[in-house]
Image (tube, grey):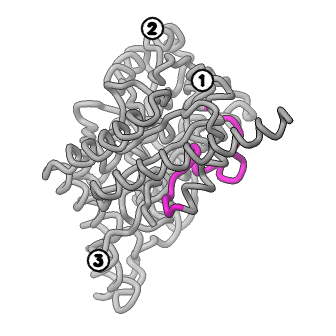
């Protein structure tokens, strides 16, 4: 299998697995225990906290470990709604992840108001419209993802933070697809909250983190024994935390080593080969502000469901859109918000690369897409011939 669905999940890095194994075997003590074995585990957790903080240029005390991006997002929205009840408005965009959209529905059900800021056809938020929507004394939170999971479009996060803070609103960003792939600095882009998930950066599933700026108050979503600095109750997922710390350390090293440029060259080579053979190919998203690992494109009249079957048979793992809606294959709300027609959305495929992919993977996948498209056309031609008779 050639795996090109990293936006859905990533393979666990062998070094990450090795780091976590001792905490599944011998270092199993509860980190809240006062004896030596417990203290050893506590030190390991704090080392992981420092590793995750370093990836964001944050302070370790600003990192709270969670079960993943979804919990982090829900925790932020619930906290802001509880602590700033006099500010009823939440602003999101129509291209957010389902975790934000569903949390926004709860915000509204609890008596708040949800405003959806428009995005341009290239997927980036309309900053002029956003500026007009953020209202001093009324807007509590602006929650916009840093990198879109379907198209890879990068948000103008610094500008978003600047205009939101000018109106006294807090800012949360879903950085699940950005963490470990691009440089994130919560000092130069001072978001108030940032959520990330380990399984999108070569750690296992079920572990994530939430950055909570020291500037803001926070009310925990999960109540319990006061773990995580009283910001998330419950005994810590120690092996997962150790894995996330190691994954963050490795991600920082790969960013420093220029792995970003290598992956971009793979993605660009992949798209170039397909476009040369299928010039009708249309890439979704801003060409200059798009994550280097992500390729979302439409092949007109090539049904994505059929293409996925052919590509799976060819040993290529990819997606027709967000993996959170696998099995439904309904029109993507992200593409709809960008003004893409339902017909073109139904012909859209998403490929997302990870650091273990090679040039051979990119080229083989491109040829598989081309071959599958030709097979689809042949099948369509046969169907038309039968109908004409």
| Residue holding disc 1 | 340
Q: Residue 164 in the image: x percent, y percent?
A: 42, 19
The image shows residue 104, relative to residue 373, as above or below, that is above
**Does dot 2 land on a helix, a strand or a loop?**
helix
Q: Is residue 330 magenta?
A: yes
| Residue holding disc 3 | 19
Q: Residue at x 27, y 48 (%)?
A: 263
- Count the numbered circles shown: 3
Say if mark 2 contacts mark 3, CB within 8 Å.
Answer: no
Q: Residues within 10 Å of mark 3 (few under 14, many from 20)?
A: some
What residue occupies the far front of the structure in this picture? Answer: 389
The boundaries of the magenta stretch are 314-333
Say whether residue 88 is visible: no
| Residue holding disc 2 | 128
Say if mark 2 contacts mark 1, CB within 8 Å.
Answer: no
Q: Residue 33 in the image: x percent, y percent?
A: 39, 82
Q: Residue 307 in the image: x percent, y percent?
A: 60, 48
Measured in 3D between alpha carbons, the distance from the residue under mark 2 to the one under mark 3, in whole angstroms, is: 47 Å
Q: In this rendering, which labeled residue sits more in front, label 2 or label 1?
A: 1
Q: Name the image quarter holding the C terminus.
A: top right
Q: Residue 123 in the image: x percent, y percent?
A: 48, 24
């Amino acid at each position: 299998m050639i795996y090109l669905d990293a936006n859905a999940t990533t393979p666990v890095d062998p070094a990450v697995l090795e780091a976590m194994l001792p905490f599944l075997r011998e270092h199993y003590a509860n980190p809240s225990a006062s004896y030596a074995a417990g203290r050893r585990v506590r030190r390991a957790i704090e080392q992981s906290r420092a590793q995750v903080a370093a990836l964001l240029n944050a302070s370790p005390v600003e990192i709270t470990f969670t079960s993943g991006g979804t919990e982090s997002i829900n925790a932020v929205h619930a906290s802001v709604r509880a602590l700033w009840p006099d500010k009823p408005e939440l602003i999101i965009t129509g291209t957010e992840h389902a975790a934000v959209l569903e949390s926004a529905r709860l915000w509204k059900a609890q008596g708040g108001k949800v405003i959806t800021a428009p995005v341009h056809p290239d997927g980036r938020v309309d900053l002029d419209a956003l500026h007009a929507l953020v209202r001093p004394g009324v807007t509590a939170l602006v929650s916009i993802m840093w990198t879109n999971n379907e198209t890879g479009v990068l948000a103008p996060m610094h500008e978003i933070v600047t205009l939101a803070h000018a109106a006294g609103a807090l800012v949360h960003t879903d950085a699940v697809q950005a963490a470990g792939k691009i440089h994130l600095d919560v000092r130069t882009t001072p978001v108030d909250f940032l959520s990330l998930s380990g399984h999108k950066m070569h750690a296992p599933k079920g572990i994530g983190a939430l950055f909570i700026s020291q500037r803001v108050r926070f009310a925990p979503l999960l109540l319990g024994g006061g773990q995580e600095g009283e910001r998330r109750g419950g005994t810590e997922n120690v092996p997962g935390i150790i894995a996330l710390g190691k994954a963050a350390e490795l991600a920082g090293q790969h960013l420093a080593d220029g792995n970003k440029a290598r992956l971009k060259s793979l993605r660009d080579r992949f798209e170039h080969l397909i476009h040369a053979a299928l010039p009708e190919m249309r890439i979704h998203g801003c060409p200059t502000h798009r994550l280097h690992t992500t390729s979302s494109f439409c092949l007109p009249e090539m049904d994505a469901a059929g293409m996925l079957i052919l590509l799976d048979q060819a040993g290529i793992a990819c997606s027709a859109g967000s993996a959170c809606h696998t099995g439904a294959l309904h029109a993507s709300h992200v593409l709809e918000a960008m003004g893409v027609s339902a017909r073109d959305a139904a012909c859209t495929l998403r490929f997302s690369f990870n650091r273990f992919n090679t040039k051979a993977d990119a080229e083989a996948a491109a040829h598989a897409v081309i071959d599958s498209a030709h097979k689809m056309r042949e099948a369509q031609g046969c169907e038309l011939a039968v109908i004409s008779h």
